[in-house]
Image: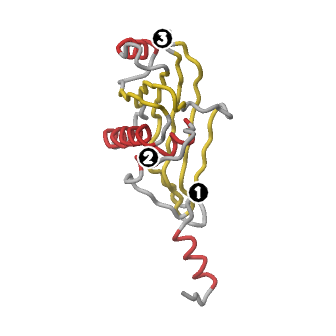
Amino acid sequence: MLLQHPTTAAACVVLMGCATTMVSVTPPLQKPVCDSAASALVLWAPQCRPDQKDVSEREAATEAGLKEFLQTSGCFANSELHRLPSINPSTVAAEVASANGRSNKVVTIMLHELGPVIKLLSSLALVEGGTEVVLQVAEYIPPAEALNRTFTVHWRNGGPGVVKGVATLPKDMQAALVMGLQPNKPQK
């Protein structure tokens, strides 16, 4: 396709958009949570904003992304995934006790954000959007449930001219988990 006018070419670039992925881990330089020889109990809970829309759909996408990540990433030799109403020391201790020593690693994942984002009139593209995942990850050492470490993963994919819906949310969750938990083998 040959464009006759430079403003037409610029408009095409602006309308099509270019997606980029940005990840920040706080505090930075975390060693991998994944251990392909470990048996893990993975506990997750949502902590949604008071004004969060489509909570049940976001939770379903979170669980689908977590399950797929645990099944395909090679992060752990085996794992159990449980959803909790909240993550606090007493609920973690109860889950670890009910696991009866089947896991030598406990990982908690608190979901703060999973969803599409859009900003209107934020740049020359008029629309800037994408998807965002924010997770608080903690690692415990059983059987004493001693907190080993905790960190936040903020993953974002999007940019000027990008508009994404909810269909990619399970895959976006997986991508954030790969960046945060750092499996040592590529996903299947």
In front: label 3 or label 1: 3
Question: Which is more toward the observer, 179 or 35?
Answer: 35
Q: Nearer the viewer, mark 2 or mark 1?
A: 1
- Residue type at numbered disc 1: Thr
Disc 2 residue type (three-letter):
Gly
**How many marks on residues?**
3
Which residue shows up at 43% across the image and 43% down it?
72
What residue would you read off at disc 2?
A: 115
| Mark 1 element type | strand
Residue located 55% across and 48% down the image: 156
Q: Earlier in the sequence, mark 2 or mark 1?
A: 1
Does dot 3 land on a helix, a strand or a loop?
loop
Alpha carbons under labels 2 and 3: distance apart: 35 Å
Residue that appears at 40% across and 42% down: 68
Amino acid at circle 3: Pro
Q: Which mark, residue 20?
A: 1
CA gap, disc 3 and disc 1: 41 Å
Q: Estimate how packed mark 2 is, as few (under 14), some (14 to 19) or many (20 or more) residues with alpha carbons within 10 Å.
A: many
Residue at left 58%, top 25%?
150
From this view, report whether residue 27 is shown above or below residue 157: above
Task: Give the residue number, with chain letter if any, for mark 3.
Answer: 143
Which of 20 and 47 lies nearest the eye of the viewer? 20
Instruction: Say few, some or many: other residues with alpha carbon within 10 Å of mark 1 (under 14 / 14 to 19 / 20 or more).
Output: few
The answer to which of marks 2 and 3 sits earlier in the sequence is 2
Query: Measured from the top left, where is residue 115 in percent x and y?
Result: 43, 46
